[in-house]
Image: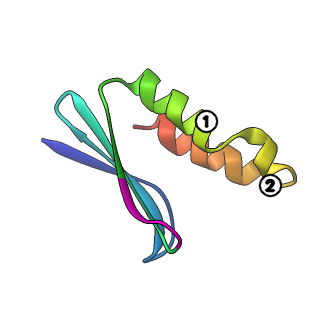
């Protein structure tokens, strides 16, 4: 069974989804700058470590609410 989670979606070119496929967690990131990237994780802690490195809190100075929303979406996976 595949569970799909939407982390964020700004438009059809800037979005991030996570699919849980058995023991694998597959993250797909689509951006207008880089195209589509896919990452495969074997555990939720590995996914959270990647998310904290990809979205450092320092880059969201003044936008802490957006950072919390993104991190909460990852925690719901």
- Residue of label 1: 53
**Relative image position of residue 2 (x, y in whole percent):** 18, 45
Per the picture, the main secondary structure of the magenta-coloured stretch is: strand
Element carrying mark 1: helix
Q: CA distance from mark 2 to mark 1?
A: 17 Å
Whether residue 4 is in magenta: the answer is no
Element carrying mark 2: loop
**Relative image position of residue 63 (x, y in whole percent):** 80, 54
Circle 1 residues within 10 Å: few <14, some 14–19, many ≥20:
few
Circle 2 residues within 10 Å: few <14, some 14–19, many ≥20:
few
Rendered-image quadrant of the C terminus: top left
> Between tags 2 and 1, which lies in front?
1
Rendered-image quadrant of the N terminus: top left
- Residue of label 2: 63
**Residue furthest to the front:** 34
Q: Is residue 36 above or below residue 43?
A: below
| Residue drawn at 63 percent across, 48 percent down | 69
Q: Which residues are magenta?
A: 33-37
| Residue drawn at 44 percent across, 32 percent down | 47
Q: Nearer the viewer, residue 13 or 10?
A: 13
**Relative image position of residue 58 (x, y in whole percent):** 80, 42
């Amino acid at each position: 069974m595949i569970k799909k989670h939407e982390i964020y979606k700004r438009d059809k070119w800037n979005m991030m989804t996570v699919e849980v496929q058995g023991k694998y967690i597959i993250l797909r990131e689509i951006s207008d700058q880089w195209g589509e990237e896919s990452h495969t994780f074997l555990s939720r802690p590995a996914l959270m470590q990647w998310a904290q490195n990809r979205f450092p809190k320092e880059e969201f100075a003044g936008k802490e609410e957006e950072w919390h929303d993104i991190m909460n979406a990852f925690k719901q996976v």
